[in-house]
Amino acid sequence: MEPKKLSYEDFLKSLELCPRLVVELLLESEDKEIYLIKREKIPFENHWHLPGGFLLKGEKIKKCALRIFKEEIGMKVDESLGDFIGLFETLDGDPRGHILHYVIKYQRLELPISNNKHFFRDQPELMIPYQKDFLRKLGYK
């Protein structure tokens, strides 16, 4: 069965019923800067965040990461790149529900820069709060 996205209504309902797994991409430059994207949708509209997305039913985590690269960054990467670095839990930090964050770290990739995609040495003030928390736990300021 080919993984497919739920309708928005079914997606919100799924978050009411059980925890959901998000695959987050921690993209780091040679200078230890992190790559963030400005969110265009609610919740957290106009906040900076790590590229990420919800795992689809029937989708392997590595395939989810490749989909996120294509959808959010507009590029393809080798499936063998990236290392799992942590699993973090948000019980009530996201208004949509209980979320588990599976974080994969990638280093030294050539990534596009624009007004809504950028590398940061320090976390910007307007960033999704729970991501700020787990990035601090990973040693980022």
Image (cartoon, rainbow, N blue to C red):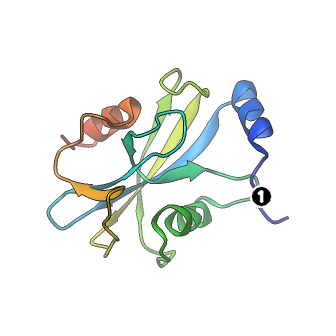
Dot 1 alpha-carbon crowd within 10 angstroms: few under 14, some 14 to 19, many 20 or more: few
Residue in the picture at 47% in, 24% down: 93
Q: What amino acid type should be assigned to the residue bearing mark 1?
A: Lys
Residue in the picture at 45% in, 66% down: 73
Q: Percent from the top left, x then y, of residue 23? A: 53, 51
Q: Percent from the top left, x then y, of residue 99? A: 56, 33
* In the foreground, 48 or 122: 48
Residue in the picture at 79% in, 45% down: 7
Q: Percent from the top left, x then y, of residue 15? A: 69, 31
Above or below residue 86? Residue 62 is: below
Above or below residue 105? Residue 87 is: above
User: Which quarter shows the N terminus?
Assistant: bottom right
Secondary structure at numbered mark 1: loop
**Residue at the outermost right position:** 1
Task: Left or right? Give the position of 46 relative to 57.
Answer: left
Task: Left or right? Give the position of 133 relative to 92.
Answer: left
Above or below residue 109? Residue 11 is: above
Q: Within the image, what quadrant is residue 116 found in?
A: bottom left
Residue wearing tag 1: 4
**Residue at the outermost front position:** 115
Above or below residue 6? Residue 25 is: below
Residue in the picture at 52% in, 20% down: 92
Task: Left or right? Give the position of 122 relative to 118.
Answer: left
Task: Left or right? Give the position of 20 relative to 28.
Answer: right
Q: Within the image, what quadrant is residue 70 found in?
A: bottom right
User: Which quarter shows the C terminus?
Assistant: top left
Q: Percent from the top left, x then y, of residue 36? A: 34, 53
